[in-house]
Image (spheres, helix red, strand yellow):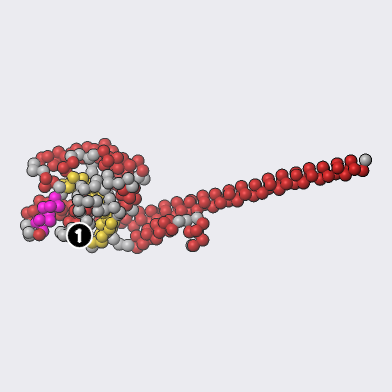
Amino acid sequence: MSILINKYLSFEDIENIEILKKSISNQLVNITCMGLYNHGKSSLLNALIKDFDEETFKTADVRETITNKSFEYGKINYIDTPGLNAEEYDDKRVYDAVKESDINIFVHAVTTGAFVEKEIEFLNKIKDNWGNPLDFINRTIFVLSRVDNIEDEKDIDLEIDKMKEQINEIFNINPLIIPVSVLRYKKGNIENKNILIKKSKLGLLEDNINELIEKFKPSILETRKKRLQNIYDELIKKSNSKFQEKKFELSKQKNIQEEFFKNLYKDVAQVEDVVKNMYKRLGE
């Protein structure tokens, strides 16, 4: 294996294989949370794992999530990703995480209104580059966060309708959108107020997460196997390509050597002719 690594494959390539091989034997369901920076992704994940001190997924005003961070909770491995609009390379980190995800949660703050350009851009990237874009939508729950900031529920319904229209324009399908208040859920649990917990709609979100897990459970393993096979195929293609490059380089070197000796033989022949002529003239 070390010869392959040195000659044809990188350590990152081999690491990707090992990660996917482990994921096949792993019974945990990977749920990836994505969205714009400061839209409530980390707060939502803390609520889902019942961390009301918000220590697991950091939620400070400064940018905390700069890499994909995961936490195992029951049968779920929750993954927090950097904000889509935070830094130049964050979009790629999010996209790579989604590619390996089983179920997705897309968080959007109601205070922003409908989806903004950066979110639309990301969804279009999914549509243009995904093998089956509808598979992404079917495995994704869109969460409208911070609904406690809106007094009139009609305004919340209006924003949900706008978001559904935007997603429908891209994927030609109506998505699942759940309005959620982490603040109410946290307060309800701390103060033991069931009315706040119910009003937060975190329970509805959890029910939908469990439904998706049960729905896609049979296909999750097959999807992981397919991803592993795709990586193997890509690595084989990559190694073959590098082999051909090396072969071409050696071929060029051989051609150069052949050309060198060919010219050398010409020079030798010319020298021999000159020497013969000189000798002939001396004899005359």
Left or right position of 89 against 284: left
Residue 83 at x, y = what percent?
26, 48
Left or right position of 282 against 87: right
Residue 31 at x, y = what percent?
27, 54
Q: Is residue 98 magenta?
A: no
Residue drawn 45% across and 51% down?
234
| Residue closer to the observer: 250 or 222 | 250
| Residue closer to the observer: 237 or 10 | 10
Residue tagged 1:
55
Residue drawn 12% across and 52% down?
183
| Residue range highlighted in magenta | 181-189
Q: Is residue 187 magenta?
A: yes
For numbered disc 1, what is the local secondary structure? loop
Residue drawn 48% across and 51% down?
238
Which residue type carries mark 1? Glu
What is the crowding at mark 1: few (fewer than 14 residues within 10 Å), some, or many (at least 20)? few
